[in-house]
Image (cartoon, coloured by chain):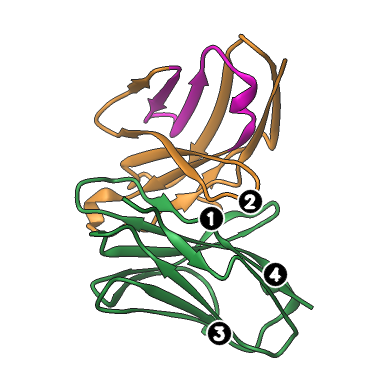
Amino acid sequence: KAGVTQTPRYLIKTRGQQVTLSCSPISGHRSVSWYQQTPGQGLQFLFEYFSETQRNKGNFPGRFSGRQFSNSRSEMNVSTLELGDSALYLCASKGPSYNEQFFGPGTRLTVL
Amino acid sequence: DQQVKQNSPSLSVQEGRISILNCDYTNSMFDYFLWYKKYPAEGPTFLISISSIKDKNEDGRFTVFLNKSAKHLSLHIVPSQPGDSAVYFCAANDATSGTYKYIFGTGTRLKVLA
């Protein structure tokens, strides 16, 4: 089985712009979660989607949003980018038979 | 409020010795715990997990211990190998909630010296 894929791998944007990141989960996995990783902060939970519905949300401002499509692929959008949004954004998928999540390689976002 | 804490940002261990990574949590509703390993430029890789109904789980060189009364878990790696050098994250979830909002610690960077 192919693993979790994320595109793009690297992205450079300027303040005020918006960005969309994409995640394709492992085939058969319907749960997709997004995390933000910054130095010293570990992985901060953004949100989880299951069958096109947001099931959980972390403590991030409304500028961070997401969605999931019928094929379980997910996108994350950040509007009005700020310098502090520079981070590694990780996507993880989970299947019905496991309690563990499987992570993609991440998208490194740099905001200038 | 950091519900999952890894108080040691880094750890150095000699090859062949035991590595012990620690994790504390505050939320008594957490009942499933996981350890992940992360190399630079890669996503975290699942290592081992433990349910709150157990106090120990082993998988090869990796053993996780859970002390529910102390709200503490630890990962033991024996023997440590240079390839184990990575950042290790612990994570916790309230599995009874039926959803999967994993809370991660800030990570411990392990360096295994040859």
- The chain displayed orange equals B
Mark 3–mark 1 CB contact (< 8 Å): no
Cβ atoms under marks 4 and 2 closer than 8 Å: no
- Tell me: A27 left or right of A76: left
Asked if A37 appears above or below B76 in the picture, the reply is below
Name the residue: 49% across, 26% down.
B74
Q: Are marks 3 and 4 on the same chain?
A: yes
Range shown magenta: B61-87
Mark pair 1, 4: CA separation: 16 Å
The residue indicated by pointer 1 is A105
The residue beneath circle 3 is: A63
- First in sequence, mark 3 or 4: give its number: 3
C-alpha distance separating marks 3 and 4: 14 Å
Q: Depth-wise, is mark 1 or mark 4 nearer the camera?
A: 1
Please tell me whether residue A4 is drawn above or below residue B58 in the rendered image.
below
Q: Is residue A4 above or below residue B65?
A: below
Specify the amino acid type for callout 1.
Answer: Pro
Numbered disc 3: secondary structure: loop
Residue of label 2? B41
Query: Which secondary structure, mark 1?
Result: loop
The residue indicated by pointer 4 is A86
B73 falls in the magenta region: yes
